[in-house]
Image (cartoon, helix red, strand yellow):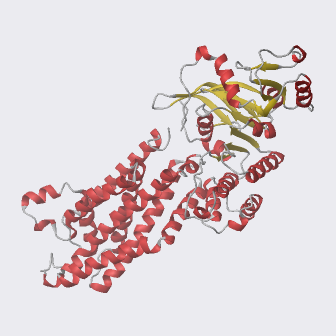
Amino acid sequence: MDTVISVRNLNKTYDSGFQALKQLDLDIHKGEIFALLGPNGAGKTTLISIICGIVRPTAGTVLAGGFDIQQHYRAARGKIGLVPQELTTDAFETVWATVTFSRGLFGKPRNPAHIERILKDLSLWDKRNDKIMALSGGMKRRVMIAKALSHEPEILFLDEPTAGVDVELRRDMWQLVEQLRERGVTIILTTHYIQEAEELADRIGVINHGKLVLVDEKNALMQKLGKRELHVQLVTPLTRIPEALSALPLTLSEDGLEITFTFDARDEQSGIAPLLRQLEDNGIEFRDLRTRESSLEDIFVHLVHESRHDETTPGRESA
Amino acid sequence: MNFHAIRAIYLFEMARTWRTLLQSIASPVISTSLYFVVFGSAIGSRMVEIDGISYGAFIIPGLIMLMLLNESISNASFGIYMPRFSGTIYEVLSAPVSYVEIVTGYVGAAASKSIILGLLILATARLFVDFHIAHPVWMVTFLVLTAVTFSLFGFIIGVWADGFEKLQIIPMMIVTPLTFLGGTFYSVNMLPPVWQTITLFNPVVYLISGFRWSFYGVADVNVGISLGMTVLFMVLCVGGIHWIFKTGYRLKN
């Protein structure tokens, strides 16, 4: 498979002394959707910022579309579109003006037809003559995507594209990502939401404390991450799990008032119904139920725990 | 050269000028007109001629310089400070543009605006006082050189400033006093000898003197030195900007 971005031995130490990236290696394949997961301060934004030219690397090399991002920055950056995490837009310009500006900035001749298509794709066409400051947060997010797409990039970075957006916009965003993939655009997105990665990504990378903890095909990874838990609150405490239920993956809380049942989210039969029948059959009364997905945080706790011996710096929000 | 980018930045910045027409064009023209009314027509009629030039005419080059310096600095510093402040600078930094292109776009727009203003004030002055321009080509040369130089200087301030008050401080605390003391309203020769020497350390003296020479053919200091000092300051500013982009100072981590 063709590699479109190749990161080698990338290090970044900020002036404050904070080491945001440590010897990071990563290959992104052409045309794939790559999801970069990680807690705040893990280095996601630093990594993206270096590839896009906003932050200088301390050491290491990055090739984008085969071009070194420092020596051949024009060729490299021309292929990249970036939608940053923060909602940073102009205020007094119109939507049309700001998107037209972006295209020019990236060295492309004017093409009103292309801009029109982008604005229509993003449901911004009606707002094209509105000042950006008059738009809602969700609309501003769309404007930022429109800007990033204005110069027809081959590689698109979406840094937390769905943080704080409503359900409708999230769905639109996902749809857009799919459309772009069909056109052959490589997409790298960062997210807190496993669900989002599950929905979209071909491959997933987990970054923590400036290192890639793992990179895997989504399907393989979901096997490991896609656990769900059912918590059953009991009316009367149990001292132990009854013999009849011992075959099930159950654990009992210390106070004996809660049973936790772990199951695979992707199985057609979750096993919840049979469990509840068996509880009833055994005369165990319960007053409440709740299910919980194993969160990214759980996974990080686990991953960090595994590699604790070589970790000293706590996570920090990167610039 | 990424000409599309230069054009995009330039037009974007000029659009800001047209959008805020009243504030960016009308107010400097009005305030300079007030100087002409007060110092040119009212008080000027009671002043003796300086170097054979009526007082009202004498102050025109200085007043244009006063406005030109302040406007160039504030246009250019605001132009680059705003995207830093709002965060939209990310786009410029991630674009396939060299720093020469970025500076050409921002500084070019800022200087254009000041030059337009300078010419407008010149036209306004004509309504109040009679004057002629001895060396029009040199007049335009000084106008353009000064506008570009101080727009470069403003760009540096806009990168250096980390708050709106810092954006104001250099024009207010340094440039305006230097302009007032640099011979806008008087000839350096009118000062006592000690102050004449001290005044020569004020770089604005050379700008005003050279500019006035292009109008009336008389100057406090040799016009060659004036030109040299202007170019020298421009070279220093270009050096400063080169350093900013080389080190990423306040633009890149």
Left/right placement of residue A189 relative to residue B95 reads: right
- Which quarter of the image is occupied by the N terminus of chain A? top right
**Where A229 falls versus B231 (above or below)?**
above
Q: Viewer-proximal residue, B226 or A239? A: A239
* Image position, residue A140 (x, y; %): 64, 56
Q: Viewer-proximal residue, A4 or B84? A: B84
**Where B239 falls versus B147 (above or below)?**
above
Left/right placement of residue B25 relative to residue A74 reads: left
Q: Viewer-proximal residue, A264 or B220? A: A264
Residue at 22% from the left image edge and 84% from the top image edge: B41
**Where B137 falls versus A122 (above or below)?**
below
Tally of numbered tags: 0
* Image position, residue A202 (x, y; %): 81, 35
Residue at 47% from the left image edge and 41% from the top image edge: B248
* Image position, residue A232 (x, y; %): 79, 28
Residue at 69% from the left image edge and 26% from the top image edge: A298
* Image position, residue A115 (x, y; %): 71, 61
Could one spot residue B221 in this view of the protein?
no
Q: Viewer-proximal residue, B37 or A91? A: A91
Left/right placement of residue A249 relative to residue B239 reads: right
Could one spot residue A27 in this view of the protein?
yes
Kindly indicate the quadrant of the structure image that contains residue A244.
top right
Residue at 69% from the left image edge and 33% from the top image edge: A37
**Where A110 falls versus A157 (above or below)?**
below
